[in-house]
Every structure is written in C-alpha cells, then in structure tokens.
Image: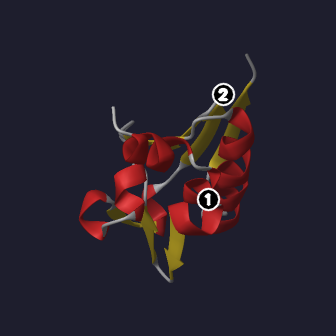
Amino acid sequence: ISAISLYFSFGSKFYDPEKVLIDMGDHVFISHLPKARLHKKYGKTISKSFVTKIQLAGNYVTLFNNSGNAIDIWAPKDKLAKPIFEQAKNIFKNAETVEINY
C-alpha cells in the first residue's frame, strides 16, 4: 500500500461532512469512497427522497431506502463518522435516525 493511498484513506480532511455529502437542492452527491473525493466518477448522486433511514454504527454511516438497499459511508474513526451522520440528518430531514453503540 502506498503512502498516498494511506493518506487519502485516513487523512481527516477527506472526511469533512460538507465534502462527503454535497447538497445540490433536490439531490445529494455522496463521496462514499475516499477516491470519490478526488474524482466524481467514483461517487453517487441520489434524490433526497431516496433516503428513509440514516444509521450510525461505529465508523460507518449507512443511508437506507424503502426497499432496504443501502449506501455505506466509511470513515477511519468513529469521531470522523459522527459529523457525517449529523450532516446526513440535516440533509435528509424526514429520514428515521438510528445510532448503534458498540
């Protein structure tokens, strides 16, 4: 593993909630992978109405839709996942929220 890939995976600046979840009006661009923060082709754009449940479990934030499909957003530390969870709650205001403590 190269030093550059470790930096992008674990560098806290790559987990800034406003860079992970980008509000675009009726849609949200999700940089759910570290490489998506470098190039948009690795991210996902979803409708705000897609998300019905937001879950925080350790260092994962998961966005669920009605059919049970999900998008996982990984952060290297719990303390980096929590602000992403809070950002998701602000964007997806009608979604149910769940926090699982280990």
Which badge, 2 or 1, is on the more N-terminal residue? 1
Residue 68 higher or lower than 12, as above or below: above
Q: Which residue lies furthest to the left in this view?
A: 41
Q: Please name the residue shown 53% across and 75% down the image.
A: 23
Q: Mark 2 points at which residue?
A: 58
Residue lying farthest to the top in this orientation: 102
Is residue 65 among the parts visible in the rendering?
no
SS at mark 2 in the image: loop
The quadrant the C terminus occupies is: top right
Q: Disc 1 on helix, strand or loop? A: helix
> In which quadrant of the rendered image does the N terminus lie?
top left
**Residue 95 visible from this viewpoint:** yes
Q: Which residue is drawn at 70% across and 34% down?
A: 78
On screen, 47 above or below 101? below
The answer to whether residue 61 is left or right of residue 8 is right
Return the residue at label 1: 13
User: What amino acid does circle 2 point to?
Assistant: Gly
